[in-house]
Amino acid sequence: MNDSDRFMKEALKQANKAYDKGEVPIGAIVVKDGKIISRAYNKRETEMKATSHAEIIAIEKACKKLNNWRLNDCDLYVTLEPCPMCAGAILNSRIKNLYFGAYDKKSGAIVSNLNMLDYEFCNHRTNYESEIMKIECEKIIKDFFKELRK
Amino acid sequence: MNDSDRFMKEALKQANKAYDKGEVPIGAIVVKDGKIISRAYNKRETEMKATSHAEIIAIEKACKKLNNWRLNDCDLYVTLEPCPMCAGAILNSRIKNLYFGAYDKKSGAIVSNLNMLDYEFCNHRTNYESEIMKIECEKIIKDFFKELRK
């Protein structure tokens, strides 16, 4: 198993925690120097907070850990393509590399609806790679909504 | 003084608090049924958190107050045009109306660089109005950076 699969597996574990709590199952982790420095999952319903997406919480925890709002040497792994808010937070925190699993046709802002990390006006460049453990990342979301419709 | 000027003046008071703490002076408030339900200012340096923009903090406080991640009947007043992250948070929290003062040519995502509130793919529509107390909102930012360069 390569590094990006290994880290995405940890993000998937977080997504599973969200699943168990009835939250849309999305998980994220922040990695620095090959080590996980924060883990988070979507808590929008639990916290009743519009900003409590997995990526935002993972970024905030990483800032706290490093006591720095700049996460220049950090990578973010997230099971689902980030929304506009989270893509903006990735840029604002200067994340180096974004790795995501499944595409979000509805709200994805990296490739699906917008290309938030490719705009010239942003003064930071975050590289990104998609389809990391895509099948597993798609499955957990599909399973969740299938069960929800029952 | 009309309502939007009156509320923007309150947002400006918040921006002044940021100014006094050496933060880029941006202030925001959330209004529901004609009443201010949250007030916030930019705390990025104080909190060392990439997400601590005035709008995000104001939205989070409003969610907490209403115990709801949906702010459907709420308006957000902010002294400066929101960045992509904050524009995304405005959509995610379903803010009804956004009022902002000055344009942010560098990072603004409402009209200056992106049109985040106009995209068809978003499942929520937030109306917006700009140039509320524009001169005052521009002045505080200009004064801050003028002093910083000294």
Image (cartoon, coloured by chain):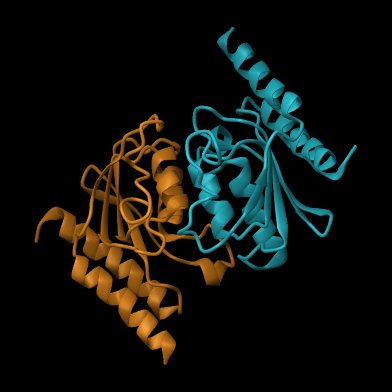
Chain colours: A orange, B cyan
Determine the residue positioned at 19% across, 59% down. Answer: A132
Q: Position of residue B110 (x, y in %)?
A: 55, 41
> Quarter-wise, where is residue B61 in the image?
bottom right
- Residue B95 x/y as whole percent: 64, 57
State the residue at coordinates (62%, 65%): B70
Q: Quadrant of residue A131?
A: bottom left
Residue A18, percent across and down? 41, 72
Left or right: where A82 falls relative to B134: left
Q: Position of residue A79 (x, y in %)?
A: 30, 63
Q: Quadrant of the N terminus of chain A?
A: bottom left
For the view shown, which residue lies furthest in the top direction? B150
Q: Taking B127 as reference, is A43 above or below it?
A: below
In the image, A53 versus B77, the foreground residue is B77
Q: Which residue does the image show at 20% across and 66% down from the upper left? A: A134
Q: Please, is residue A149 above or below residue B68 in the view?
A: below
Q: Is residue B50 left or right of residue A104?
A: right
Q: How many circles with numbers are drawn on the protein?
A: 0
The furthest residue to the bottom: A150
Residue name at image x 37 percent, y 80 percent: A144
Q: As displayed, is residue B112 above or below residue B57?
A: above
Q: Which quadrant is the C terminus of chain A positioned in?
A: bottom left
What is the residue that sits farthest to the left in this orientation? A1
